[in-house]
Image (cartoon, rainbow, N blue to C red):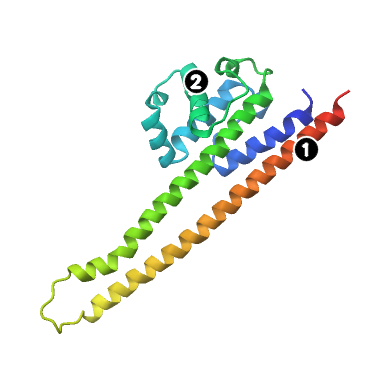
Amino acid sequence: MSSLAIDGPLNNFRRGLKLCKYNAAIDYQRVGSPQQLLPVLHYILLDYSPHLSSYFLDKFPAIAYATDEKFIETVFKIMRVEFQYLPVLKPNQFFTGLEHFVVHKIKIVSDLIFFCRRKHNDFVKIKRKQNKKSSNSLPSSSYQTRPRINETTQLNREDRLCLTIKKCFAQLNSKIDNVEASLNERLENLETRILLHEQHQQMVSCSISAP
């Protein structure tokens, strides 16, 4: 296999591992081996994000205790059902030797990383919107439920200060959510453009090197 054929997918693979903070050691000389790729798949689906692990364990509970063969079958099913992605390999081909289907294996894992990061960001956005609504409702609810001594009684200085601080935090959280959501969206767009560019470069390189 030429270096041109594997360089693009391998760069995407490394970038994906860095973005999802995968810190376990990988032997890149044996990257086509299932022993190198299975831990990555386990991490992405079950350890990378509490949102994702809860979601996948709820929909595909067997993934937690499946054999390696059943695990890969479930991974391929997740990619079809959740991401409308059809792997170019069959599950049993994922367990072929070190030199077989290396590029396809790396690409499948890289694409799963991309899809899972995007789904994780979607979960985070939903969670933050829920927290925003909850925090925005705190000041008014605390004020309305506070017992009144009489009709002319006003909140004392400490109460007013507490409400002001809560409002400030709610506004700050809202701005942080908006900025982070915007950055995540820009990052996803940039990753997509990089992926498409590298795929185009790979196709050009292959066409040039073809006899």
Residue at disc 1, secondary structure: helix
Locate the C terminus by quadrant: top right
Residue 187 visible somewhere in the drawing: yes
109 relative position to 207: left or right:
left
**Where 154 falls versus 71 (above or below)?**
below
Q: CA distance from mark 2 to mark 1?
A: 31 Å
- State the residue at coordinates (58%, 30%): 109
Residue 73: mark in rendering: 2
As drawn, the residue found furthest toward the bottom would be: 152
Q: What is the crowding at mark 2: few (fewer than 14 residues within 10 Å), some, or many (at least 20)?
A: some
| Quadrant in which residue 141 is drawn | bottom left
164 relative position to 142: left or right:
right
- State the residue at coordinates (51%, 38%): 116
Percent x, y of residue 186: 60, 53
Which of the two labelled residues, at mark 2 and mark 1, occupies the earlier sequence position?
2
57 relative position to 37: left or right:
left
**Where 122 falls versus 145 (above or below)?**
above
As drawn, the residue found furthest toward the left would be: 149
Amino acid carrying mark 2 in the image? Glu
| Quadrant in which residue 62 is drawn | top left
